[in-house]
């Protein structure tokens, strides 16, 4: 999961205790307690509520407290479902807190098991990598707190904002929707673990595509230290004037649809890479990551895959609206209105008819 740097820090650092708490206090003569509450500014891109905003918890995201001068890590770990955690730091030290768009949705036993791990990458996606370490070294989106001094117990609130220059909040909404997808899948299949999913979000990306396994230059599938396959995909970050510059980073419809294609991807099952064969969670009889235009008929296998993913998006969000944010316009489709979509003819199928 982690780059070499983060694995070293993880061993050296004390893990966060993932528990709700009212505040920090001094633990003894040598340490002080730090309570962290992390969140992000979520915007709404569903018409007619363009750019409505609320603060949501950065659930299950990674945080670390470090010395701003030496980068020495005092604590690191995943927050809980409310975006909260507590840790301790040596008394008298100066430190900052880094909130990272890297997530782990814990599994049913909550002791090392997890449904999904992943992150939102702040870099360019490549067709291949030297190895898993090279992939993990691509930085994840993150935000920094102010500098604090460990003289007494502290309550630290850190919020990723869309109003900031780099609009980091969008990365945390992508992470949050990946956690939501894994949580909803756990209700359907409690024993199903998912591969590691890494989303590349950038203003340079003009469309959102579907997850595929990442490879090295020898054309071998990359896996993390847990054995789970590494998947990657792009998220549209090229804004639309009609959405005040927003793109798919807040378009939960498109995010959930994209995540759903993970179920049909090669090497997605089991989550620990089988190496010698390319099984998938759900059988697919068409090209991997096949895309069908919403108003176009296609052969039945591709229509089923795309339509099923549309259905998953609507069902998991409990919202029949499907939103396409394009560079020059916004299209909205309502699955609850059967007359929205043309009837299939001539043995061809429409993805919306499937959904």
Image (spheres, rainbow, N blue to C red):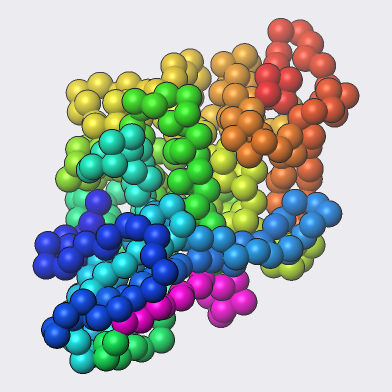
Residue drawn 57% across the image and 45% down it: 255
In this picture, which residue range is highlighted in magenta? 153-166
Query: Does the magenta portion include 262?
Result: no
Residue drawn 44% across the image and 38% down it: 182
Residue drawn 25% across the image and 21% down it: 277
Residue 76 in view here: yes
Quadrant in which the C terminus is drawn? top right
**Is residue 87 left or right of 242 when viewed as pictured?**
left
Q: Residue most toward the right?
A: 339
Q: Is residue 150 above or below residue 306?
A: below
Q: Is residue 50 above or below residue 148?
A: above
Query: Which is nearer the eye, 67 or 218?
Result: 67
Dividing the picture into quarters, in which one does residue 14 lie? bottom left
Residue 152 position within the rendered picture, expressed as x and y whole percent measured from the top left: 29, 87
Dividing the picture into quarters, in which one does residue 106 lie? top left
Residue 190 position within the rendered picture, expressed as x and y whole percent measured from the top left: 39, 26
Residue 143 position within the rendered picture, expressed as x and y whole percent measured from the top left: 43, 74
Query: Which is nearer the eye, 124 or 353?
Result: 353
Residue 306 in view here: no
Residue 212 position within the rendered picture, expressed as x and y whole percent measured from the top left: 40, 38
Query: Which is nearer the eye, 263 or 328?
Result: 263
**Is residue 104 left or right of 26 when viewed as pictured?**
right
């Amino acid at each position: 999961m982690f780059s070499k740097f983060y694995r070293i820090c993880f061993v050296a650092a004390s893990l966060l205790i993932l528990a709700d708490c009212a505040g920090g206090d001094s633990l003894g003569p040598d340490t002080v307690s730090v309570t962290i509450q992390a969140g992000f500014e979520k915007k709404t891109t569903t018409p007619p509520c363009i750019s409505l905003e609320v603060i949501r918890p950065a659930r299950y995201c990674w945080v670390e407290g470090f010395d701003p001068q030496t980068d020495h890590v005092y604590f690191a770990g995943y927050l809980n479902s409310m975006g909260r955690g507590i840790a301790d730091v040596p008394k008298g030290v100066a430190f900052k807190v880094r909130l990272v768009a890297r997530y782990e949705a814990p599994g049913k036993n909550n002791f090392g098991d997890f449904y999904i791990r992943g992150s939102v990458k702040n870099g360019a996606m490549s067709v291949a990598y030297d190895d898993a370490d090279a992939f993990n070294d691509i930085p994840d989106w993150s935000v920094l707190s102010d500098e604090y001094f460990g003289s007494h117990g502290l309550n630290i609130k850190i919020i990723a904002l869309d109003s900031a220059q780099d609009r980091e909040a969008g990365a945390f909404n992508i992470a949050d929707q990946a956690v939501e997808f894994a949580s909803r899948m756990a209700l359907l299949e409690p024993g199903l673990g998912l591969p590691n999913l890494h989303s590349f979000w950038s203003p340079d990306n003009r469309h959102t595509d579907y997850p595929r396994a990442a490879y090295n230059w020898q054309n071998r599938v990359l896996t993390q230290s847990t054995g789970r396959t590494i998947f990657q995909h792009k998220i549209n970050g090229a804004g639309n004037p009609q959405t005040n510059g927003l793109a798919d980073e807040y378009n939960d419809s498109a995010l959930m649809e994209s995540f759903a294609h993970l179920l049909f991807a090669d090497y997605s099952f089991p989550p620990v890479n089988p190496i010698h064969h390319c099984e998938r969670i759900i059988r697919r009889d068409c090209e991997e990551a096949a895309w069908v235009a919403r108003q176009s008929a296609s052969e039945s296998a591709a229509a089923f895959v795309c339509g099923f993913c549309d259905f998953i998006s609507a069902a998991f969000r409990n919202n029949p609206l499907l939103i396409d944010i394009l560079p020059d316009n916004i299209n909205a489709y309502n699955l609850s209105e059967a007359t929205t979509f043309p009837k299939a003819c001539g043995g061809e199928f429409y993805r919306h008819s499937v959904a």
